[in-house]
Amino acid sequence: MSLRIEVLGRHHRALIEDFRNQHRTLVDYLRRFALRHAEKDLLARTFLAIEEVAGAERLAGYFTLATASVERTTVGSIESLSRLPGFPIPAVLLARLAVDERVQGQGLGRYLFEEALGLTLQLAHSGPVAFRLFVTDAIDESAARFYERFGFSRLAAEFPCRMVLDLKPLLEISEIP
């Protein structure tokens, strides 16, 4: 699979219309809100995974990043966060991650997650702001298990389920020369 990651723009509208996913909310967000959230509202940025198929382009998946904060009291059970001050913890939110149903099961979800995490770690290292957490809201049990494989912890039992990953250990590892 030959993929490239691009920031969503107006020129992607035709690709978006052909995107399919079993979760209607993920399709609706991409078609109705993602571009507006990026350009007009300044709420989030969406990244597209575009693949070449028989000389044509197809949208294979996407992810959306935004900012967030997590109330300190909700993460008290996570040992690495238990000693932080009592105010909200800054975070980057993986607001959406979706793979087209025609290419599911080929590792694209993992690839998109790693791209999102990579951008987040890059911002943490060299960006003008500091944050501690990578956050997502798992849409269902299958998504929650997917994120748990990467070290996320659940903060709730119902869905969508808020999940967090403490970035400090990843940042310390990546600072080693």
Image (cartoon, rainbow, N blue to C red):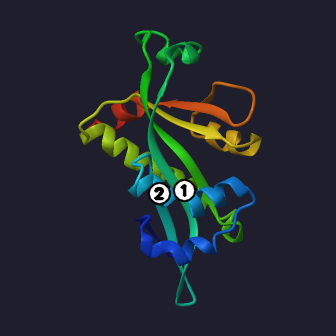
Pointer 2 local density, CA inside 10 Å: few below 14, some 14–19, many at least 20 = some
Looking at the image, residue 112 lies above or below residue 132: below
Residues marked 1 and 2 touching at CB (< 8 Å): yes
Based on the displayed image, in which of its 4 quarters is residue 17 positioned? Answer: bottom right
Residue 16 position within the rendered picture, expressed as x and y whole percent measured from the top left: 57, 70
Q: Which residue is drawn at 44% across and 48% down?
A: 44
Q: Residue at x 54, y 56 (%)?
A: 33
Distance Cα–Cα, label 1 vs label 2: 5 Å
Q: In which quarter of the image is the C terminus?
A: top left
Q: Quadrant of the N terminus?
A: bottom right
Residue 25 position within the rendered picture, expressed as x and y whole percent measured from the top left: 68, 53
Residue 157 position within the rendered picture, expressed as x and y whole percent measured from the top left: 74, 27
**On the image, numbered disc 1 is attached to which residue?**
33
Q: How many marks?
A: 2
Q: Which mark is drawn over residue 121?
A: none
Q: Residue at x 62, y 38 (%)?
A: 137
Foreground pick, 54 / 157: 157
Is residue 111 at all visible to an observer of this figure? no
Pointer 1 local density, CA inside 10 Å: few below 14, some 14–19, many at least 20 = few
- Residue 104 vs residue 68: left or right? right
Foreground pick, 140 / 1: 140
Q: Which residue is drawn at 69% across and 39% down?
A: 144
Based on the displayed image, in which of its 4 quarters is residue 54 positioned? Answer: bottom right
State the SS at label 2.
helix
Inspect the image, locate mark 1, and give the three-letter code of the amino acid beneath it: Phe
- Residue 103 vs residue 176: left or right? right
**On the image, numbered disc 2 is attached to which residue?**
36
Is residue 150 at all visible to an observer of this figure? yes
State the SS at label 1.
helix
